[in-house]
Amino acid sequence: MEKTYDTTKIETLWYRAWERSGYFAPGDEGPSYCIMIPPPNVTGSLHMGHAFQDTIMDALTRFKRMDGRSALWQPGSDHAGIATQMVVERQLQSQGLDRKALGREAFVERVWEWKERSGGTISRQLRRLGASLDWEHERFTMDPGLSAAVLETFVRLYEKGLIYRGKRLVNWDPVLLTAISDLEVASEEEDGFLWHIRYPVAGEKNGHVTVATTRPETLLGDTAVAVHPDDERYRHLRGKQLELPLTGRLIPVISDEHVDPEFGSGCVKITPAHDFNDYAVGQRHGLSLINIFTPDAHINDNAPGPYRGLDRFEARERVLADLAQRGLLERREKHKLMVPRGDRSHSVIEPYLTDQWFVRTEPLARPAIEAVESGRVRFVPESWAKTYYEWMHNIEDWCISRQLWWGHRIPAWYDREGNTYVGRSEAQVREKHGLEASVPLTQDEDVLDTWFSSQLWPFSTLGWPAHTDRLDRFYPTSVLVTGFDIIFFWVARMIMMGLEFMGDVPFREVYIHGLVRDADGAKMSKSKGNILDPLDLIDGIGLDALLEKRTTGLMQPELAPRIHEATIRQFPNGIPAFGTDALRFTFCSLATTGRDIRFDLGRIEGYRNFCNKLWNAARFVVMNTEDGGRSGDAGLDHGAAAGPGAEPRVEPEAQSAVSLGVADRWIRSRLNATVAAVREAFDAYRFDRAAHAIYEFTWNQYCDWYLELVKATLADGAVDSAARLGARRTLLDVLETLLRLAHPLMPFITEEIWQRVAPAIGRGGKTIMLAPFPVYRKGWEDADAESEIAWVQGLVLGIRQIRGEMNISPSKRLRVLLQGPPAIPGTLERCGASILSLGRLESIEWVNGDEAPRHSALALHGEVKILVPLEGLIDVAGETARLRRELEKQSTDLDRCRAKLANEKFVSRAPAPVVAKERARLESITSAIVQLEGQLARLEQP
């Protein structure tokens, strides 16, 4: 084996070999197991959230594949209507071209060209992450097959009366000129104003009500003023009319419980065509809807003449000026408010009244609610089911049309009279409705919301509406892995559509993971300068290249100086290559159920060291077991060769040739417990526990203890050959099983080492990917061995404690005396060589009596005293003087610290963290003094 682990070289070669060999395809045998990848945008690139989510899905898939399941991880991407159209439009603009001048057909051709050229970026990045997706069946939401599924869904829902066209309020982007979903609206708190405006009472000379608003321009579309039914201040106004300023219109005063009497004056202007809450109030009271905006948010002809044609914000200033001139602007106050902006255009979103297509969702929601209530779909953690119920019980009809050119065009046609015909094609529409070719029909210009096609993902990717073997085999799928933010937008809709068209739920479990945040818990964003590119962490990136990435594809150039700001502070010379396995293991170690994770770059550095530790351990094993540690083909198998559920194989003729020592039995027992813990963790979606169990066993038990314990057996010529053979076999058996155990989390390094280790113990198979996952073996527990090694560990740690406290050089061999009753008789005889090696001892022996030799250091191990005579090891007089000086210094510091904390002014006025730090310092000094006094007492004993 190479001295160092070259991540880039090995990871790239192994992934190509896996994919070329077809190992990612589901096997022909075993129960089915299926995960559908949440389809990333075809415009996208792998960000930290993707990498975290995909690591979890790949770990599950690899685990189930090794555990004998026919495992399918279905890949694919979403056409991302708005995002993709914007990318291509920007390209056209850079060439001096315009989408509308180009025409719809030519523009869509340009989008397809771009998709073929650049659309595979995220697929290439997923490969770099080690994702074992079934690439031969990769799908795209605009593929012919998936497009057929979208068409079939729309027509069937329309024919059942579950899709209709109507004029309703929607989120409208006045820059992109399209309706958008709630998920595409980013609302953030901004500084603004609250204007208090007087509305005169009709017929009263000086009577008026004061209305507080953050959007004074929309008063041009007001149709009422509302007060709370229980607000006694305005009881006298109910049923009266108000003069709507600047318009010459009269509007009524109405009572509605929507009004918060504590906000502003307790009077609320109602603009049903420009506010979602006002729209609901208007529907309850039969108010008219007056739209005052054009699609690009200019004032239209429904408003008074002086304001027509003005941009909405220009209109605001004109309205305020005119109100002030008429004495109707009472006052202005600063006010923080949530401003909805489009996540693509960053323009302020308008609630806008327009004709759109909608899905009638309430009939679809009822069975979807029951599916979760009955347990047919289970949320992990279960608490997210409450969020699901809350949304589903308050569900509203879904706007599915978008005013774009890229996407699935709505299969509806109109004649000159405005009649609507829906069908799978124009020819079918004509045939069904008896329309001659001479009757002109025009297809709807709009396309469907991308969520409409992605809601069909669990079955459209498997071939629906055709009846396919893959559909029979893998639907319903096993688990959906996704974030909480799309429970309603995607998860709920998939459940509704699965029940509607497949008669069954689309997945049995929904694992909801948290968001990836930075080390301080802040959301990663370009504006904060704390974003990380997972590919940069895997392959490394120099400082110049990192700086160059700042402006790539950035819509807001002013953010460029801040991008990667936090990363550059931590890695001023660029990011080193940590490798895929280190990144994946970091994600898994942080994946506590449902909680956001804080990604600390220090953790990935630590897990890169863990990979190196495993590599170095494997090199030690390979060097010490060149012949495989075998006698013929003998071995103590951990249930791998014959597949899951197989019993360990020990060939009878070899049993007498292999002798397992206490350490061998101990590490096998610890391995068995680790296998159980990892399996339990996978079943509970506790990837953090799986990672912890693997890390703890590998580093602290196998590497730090077993490899050290066994060195004496391997090196001692006096040890019989059967014991050496047992140690060598155990080295190989345990390492090989550990590799299979860790493979789902760390696929590359485990494959590379396994290829060198597995043949040495007669393990068949071309890849660790298809080797069986370890199973727990009853009877492998060895309580006696575990107790004995625990005693040895405590003894060695006691010796190391003395060495550290007395400042004895690690190179000096110690003479150790033990006093007290032997906890486990015969331990020194069985483990003496290992103890001498681990403790770097000259000798160790039991002595009678209770008196310790003069100038002996002491440590307690249960009822046993560990004594180390110090004569000849250290200069007792010099060490005594040094300890006295240090004790005097610490005592002085203790007095100062106590005086500081006794000072009332310091405790009451200093910042809390400063006081806490001083108290922690007091504890530290006190502990140091106790330790120094103990060392001094041992040196000064008579």
Image (cartoon, rainbow, N blue to C red):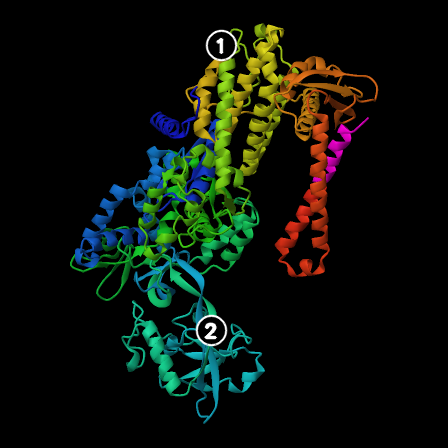
278 in relation to 37, above or below? below
Quadrant for the C terminus in the image: top right
Of residues 447 and 198, the one nearer the viewer is 198
- Tell me the CA gap for discs 1 and 2: 81 Å
Residue that carries the numbered disc 1 in the rendered image = 627
Query: Crowding at label 2, few (<14), some or many (≥20) Cα neighbours within 10 Å?
Result: few
Q: Amino acid at mark 1?
A: Asp
Q: Residue 436: name its quadrant.
A: bottom left
Q: Is residue 288 magenta?
A: no
Residue 503 seen from this side: yes
Q: Picture coordinates of residue 632 (x, y %)? A: 51, 6
Of residues 506 and 246, the one nearer the viewer is 246
Of residues 423 and 174, the one nearer the viewer is 174
x 63%, y 22%: residue:
669
Q: Amino acid at mark 2?
A: Lys
Q: Which residues are magenta?
A: 928-942
Q: Provide the secondary structure element on which disc 2 rests.
A: strand
Q: Picture coordinates of residue 128 (x, y %)? A: 37, 35
Query: Crowding at label 1, few (<14), some or many (≥20) Cα neighbours within 10 Å?
Result: few
Quadrant for the N terminus in the image: top left
Q: Picture coordinates of residue 262 (x, y %)? A: 55, 75
Q: Which mark is residue 334?
A: 2
In the rendered structure, which disc, 1 or 2, sits on the residue that comes first in sequence?
A: 2
Q: Is residue 526 left or right of 681 when viewed as pictured?
A: left
684 in relation to 88, above or below? above
